[in-house]
Image (cartoon, rainbow, N blue to C red):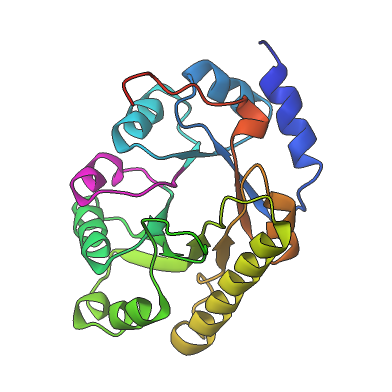
Amino acid sequence: MSHLVSEQLKKIKRTIPEQVKLVAVSKTKPIEDILEAYKAGQICFGENKAQEMEAKYAALPADIEWHFIGHLQTNKVKYIAPFVSLIEAVDSLKLLKEINKQAAKFNRQIPCLLQFHIAEEETKFGLDREEAITMLESEAYKKMKNIQISGVMGMATFTEDMQQVQREFIHLREIFNWLKSTYFPQAESFKEISMGMSGDYPIAIEAGATIVRVGSLIFGERNYPATE
């Protein structure tokens, strides 16, 4: 197993342009694997369970940048609020309010991405344009001082049809452009498009991704415990 992670990581990095950030998706993976990737120069890691992320944060080097990439329940925000670098999947005003509230306790401003539902399949989470408008024009949002909307995130349909995946990624880029011109024309921090995973990240980069989330190509397939 040794050095496999660092070798895979180097391979992936050669395929990613310098201006695109690689999030190594380390969910369910042990500390040793993350440390190996870190020693090979990887700084940014993605987790989808708040308490697992909190435990890993405590056990690993302090300069690691942690991205929360899964669906975040409001009652779990408190576990990651002190240290999280980016919450990639904000899909409701309720969640945004909680992030703002918890960030205030630590005198932080937490960067967030708005998750949009771009897949043709029925996935559970993600905003549509109307919901985004309602959120961004709400009085509650306008009063928030401890969050920063930094861009958008989306997940393509799980399919072999790469043309469909490409269409969905282009659609997310169009949503980003619309939000940028309508709501964030002066905000330099509104710049991220997080899309693309192990199976489709090259297509995402081509479509304008600034962040890609790659897990199994770096760490190998995930072993989920039987209880899940």
Q: Quadrant of the C terminus?
A: top left
Q: Quadrant of the N terminus?
A: top right
In the image, residue 79 above or below residue 153:
above
- The percent coordinates of residue 73 (x first, y second) are 25, 48
Residue 69 vs residue 162, the one in the foreground: 162
From which residue to which does the magenta span run? Answer: 67-84
Residue 199 vs residue 187, the one in the foreground: 199
The residue lying furthest to the top in this view is 1
Q: Residue at x 40, y 46 (%)?
A: 70
Residue 79 occupies quadrant: top left
The answer to whether residue 51 shows anywhere in this view is yes
Q: Residue at x 43, y 23 (%)?
A: 224
Q: Is residue 32 magenta?
A: no
Q: Residue at x 53, y 16 (%)?
A: 32
In the image, residue 114 above or below residue 179:
above
The answer to whether residue 186 shows anywhere in this view is no
Residue 141 occupies quadrant: bottom left
Q: Is residue 72 magenta?
A: yes
Is 178 placed left or right of 85 in the picture? right
- The percent coordinates of residue 126 (x first, y second) are 39, 63
**Count of numbered tags:** 0
- The percent coordinates of residue 188 (x first, y second) are 54, 74
- The percent coordinates of residue 190 (x first, y second) are 51, 72
In the image, residue 47 above or below residue 170:
above
Q: Residue at x 49, y 21 (%)?
A: 223
Residue 217 vs residue 54, the one in the foreground: 217
In the image, residue 198 above or below residue 35:
below
